[in-house]
């Protein structure tokens, strides 16, 4: 994930969006906003979203519906999602959210310091994960492009890997036998 991928904040209340933007601004990441689930999905599908901070209950398309859709689309299924709820503890909501792979469920009003810490960790972890995935792809390409001269020789005899290991001699570190002992 490039460092300019946005943190997308989605809530249908402007005052909440404003408060969340101010809470996350010290992280230094680009912040984008949406006021509905539909608008959020459009931004997500356009790309460049690195993390989603999403209200659960909104008019129109609700937060869990956005997550359900995201998890079905390959390009969006691994974007970290933090859900916000203002309705207190709800075991059914919690179970549904975590079944969809949501990273966390945060109750409103949010603790700014705790939210910044969670968002920083999730954003950075996803960036590291994508960097490692790219490194693995690069290494696989290098290995694929690398030609082994023995691959071009006709194979005779056993093809098992152990057959290519030369027979072992007596260990050189073994002490020679003494005469007269």
Image: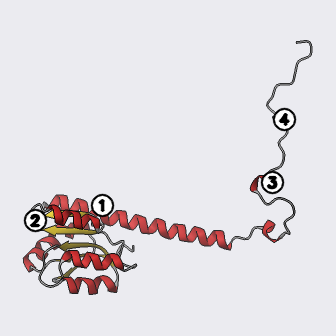
Residue 63 position in % (x across, y down): 19, 76
- Furthest toward the front, the residue is 92
172 sits left or right of 141 in the view? right
Q: Residues within 10 Å of mark 4 (few under 14, many from 20)?
A: few
Residue closer to the observer: 175 or 113: 175
Q: Residues within 10 Å of mark 1 (few under 14, many from 20)?
A: few
Residue closer to the observer: 156 or 16: 156
Residue closer to the observer: 34 or 157: 157
Label 3 to label 1, Cα distance in Å?
A: 49 Å
| Residue that carries the numbered disc 4 in the rendered image | 170
Label 1 to label 2, Cα distance in Å?
A: 20 Å
Nearest to N terminus: mark 2 or mark 3? 2
Nearest to N terminus: mark 1 or mark 2? 2
Residue closer to the observer: 161 or 175: 161
| Residue that carries the numbered disc 3 in the rendered image | 163
| Residue that carries the numbered disc 1 in the rendered image | 121
Among the 4 quarters of the image, the one containing residue 113: bottom left
Q: In what element is the residue under mark 4? A: loop
Nearest to N terminus: mark 4 or mark 2? 2
| Residue that carries the numbered disc 2 in the rendered image | 108
Which-is-in-front pick, marks 4 and 3? Answer: 3
């Amino acid at each position: 994930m490039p460092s300019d991928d946005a943190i997308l904040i989605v809530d249908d209340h402007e005052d909440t969006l404003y408060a969340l933007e101010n809470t996350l601004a010290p992280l230094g990441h680009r912040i984008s906003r949406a006021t509905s689930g539909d608008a959020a999905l459009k931004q997500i599908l356009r790309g460049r979203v690195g993390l989603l901070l999403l209200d659960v209950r909104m008019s129109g398309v609700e937060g869990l519906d956005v997550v359900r859709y995201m998890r079905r689309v390959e390009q969006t299924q691994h974007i970290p999602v933090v859900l916000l709820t203002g309705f207190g503890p709800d075991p059914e909501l919690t179970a549904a959210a975590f079944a969809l792979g949501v990273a966390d469920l945060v109750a409103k009003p949010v603790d700014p310091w705790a939210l910044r810490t969670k968002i920083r960790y999730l954003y950075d972890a996803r960036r590291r994960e994508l960097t490692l995935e790219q490194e693995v792809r690069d290494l696989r390409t290098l290995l694929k492009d690398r030609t082994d001269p023995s691959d071009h020789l006709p194979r005779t005899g056993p093809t098992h890997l152990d057959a290519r290991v030369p027979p072992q001699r007596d260990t050189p570190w073994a002490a020679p036998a003494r005469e007269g002992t």
